Image (cartoon, rainbow, N blue to C red):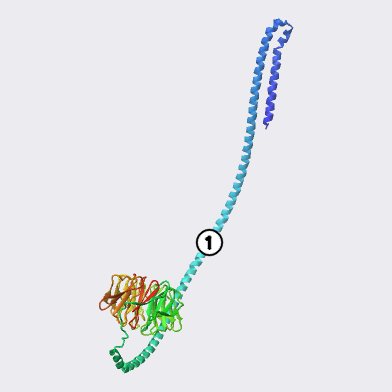
Amino acid sequence: MRTSDELANAAIKHALKALRKRHLLEEGAHSSAFNALARPFVAQGSEWKEKVEKLEQELQQCYKAQARLSEQLVVEVAECRNSKALAQEKEALNSDLQLEVTRLREECQQLKEDLDEKTKALDLVLSENKALRAQLEEATEKANAAEAENKMLVDRWMLQKMQEAERINEANAIYEGILDQFKARSIENLAREQVDGVVRQFEAGAENFMETTIPTACKHKIPAHEGGCGSILFERNSDKLISGGQDRTVKIWNSKTGTLLNTLYGCVGTVLDLAVTHDNRSIVAASSSNNLFVWDVGSGRIHHTLTGHRDKACAVDTSKISSRHAVSASYDHTIKVWDLQRGYCINTLISSSNCNALCFSMDELTVCSGHVDGNIRLWDIKSGKLLSEVAAHSLAVTSISLSSGGNIVLTSGRDNLHNLFDMRSLEVCGTLRATGNKLASNWSRSCISANDNYVAAGSADGSVQVWSIPRADVVSTLKEHTAPVLCCSWSGLGKPLATADKNGSICIWV
């Protein structure tokens, strides 16, 4: 393939040959003129002049043709160079494209190989997954079988424990019955010896042991607990006041002087309710940590931690005739009966509604409970059966308090009513209400006086209303608290009355 320079040189040589050939032809054509030189100059002057002019014109035409050819040659040379550069670019692009095609083919081949490997790996994983699923199903079946077997063993173990506990309880009941008979005979003999003196003392104007007066003034206001005080009660037939609050402590107070006697530590949650045993030797606290804590009052140490509830324990009560048994209620829909001497549960009652409050009957055979659905229920604690149920309030029951005689039970509800029920028939025998009395929480505790003549209940506005049961009317409104009153407790001696509020303050009323 000839280059553009070679083509240009060849074109120039061809043009020069053409000019020389033409020049020779012109010389041949003008040979007659040279021959005529011999003629006289004057005679041939005009002829020569014409020929010169003609030759000049032809020479000019040759120059013009040469210029055109030169321009055409330059254009063709430039076009040739451009074509060469374009061809080189095309060749370079073609080379790059060929390299790219080669690379893409190699990459495609690599991707195919990777796809084959991943497909094989996926098949292997699917087969392993299938095998693992089969193993999992087999293990699940074994676990279910083991769980069922474990549950059966636990049920058998619990049944044996319950039977053993029942045998122990029966033996203890026989022993306590013998002791009670012995004590009853001793007390009967002592009463016969002292009855005349007691009658004479009463006639002489001595203070009645169960005398209850209407409280009118606050004797002491005690900042008892930080964060609030949710439960207070008096020791049985004593003026010592027990309180529990959000600071996770239980405190014992002298209600006459308002001084702190002792502080019990160890509770790991907010104290929601309190109970004291029949002999005043132990205090039981229900807490938000799902557990119950039993303190020995003499040493101030925890004697038992009762576990078993799966939600907060919100209510507790102890037997009215012995120091052995306690009942508790939790928001796990259960009521549990506890042996305080051994520290374990001896029966569990299951309810359809959460229980907010409960109390033992005087015979220690039944428990009365108040629930969120507004009903009160009577249970047999040995068999765990529901004996009777009645709709007490239109809203949740917040408090249950048994009268000192054991025949009347006081219930309070979020409908702001305070109802009196006959414990034997669960029939309403009285309803107390007041315009300004509005309960502050689901655990607002009201109380009944020692002589069963008065009822006290706190309100969300900080006031405390006192009703006369025979008159079914408010006889006193106490105002000292600056926060909603959560609980009330009347001393078994007849006075004083204690109330506690949401700020943790306790007021002693006389």
Give 134 or 482, whichever is nearer the viewer: 482
Counting the numbered discs, the total is 1
**Residue 33, position as x, y percentages in the image:** 71, 10
**Residue 210, position as x, y percentages in the image:** 31, 84
Instruction: Note whether 225 is above or below 63 in the view shown.
Output: below
Instruction: Note whether 124 is above or below 370 in the view shown.
Output: above
**Residue 484, position as x, y percentages in the image:** 36, 71
Q: Going 64% across and 20% down the picture, which residue do you hit?
A: 64
The residue labelled by disc 1 is: 127
Is disc 1 surrounded by few (<14), some (14 to 19) or many (20+) residues within 10 Å? few
- Quarter of the image for residue 319 reads bottom left
In the rendered view of the protein, which quadrant contains the N terminus?
top right
Which residue, as the protein is rendered here, is positioned at the far left?
Answer: 471
Instruction: Note whether 11 is above or below 412 in the view shown.
Output: above
Q: Is residue 443 visible?
A: no
In the rendered view of the protein, which quadrant contains the C terminus?
bottom left
**Residue 67, position as x, y percentages in the image:** 65, 22
Query: Which amino acid does the dot numbered 1 rest on?
Result: Ser
Secondary structure under tag 1 reads: helix
Q: Is residue 398 visible?
A: yes
- Quarter of the image for residue 456 reads bottom left
Q: Going 55% across and 60% down the picture, which residue do you hit?
A: 124
- Quarter of the image for residue 284 reads bottom left
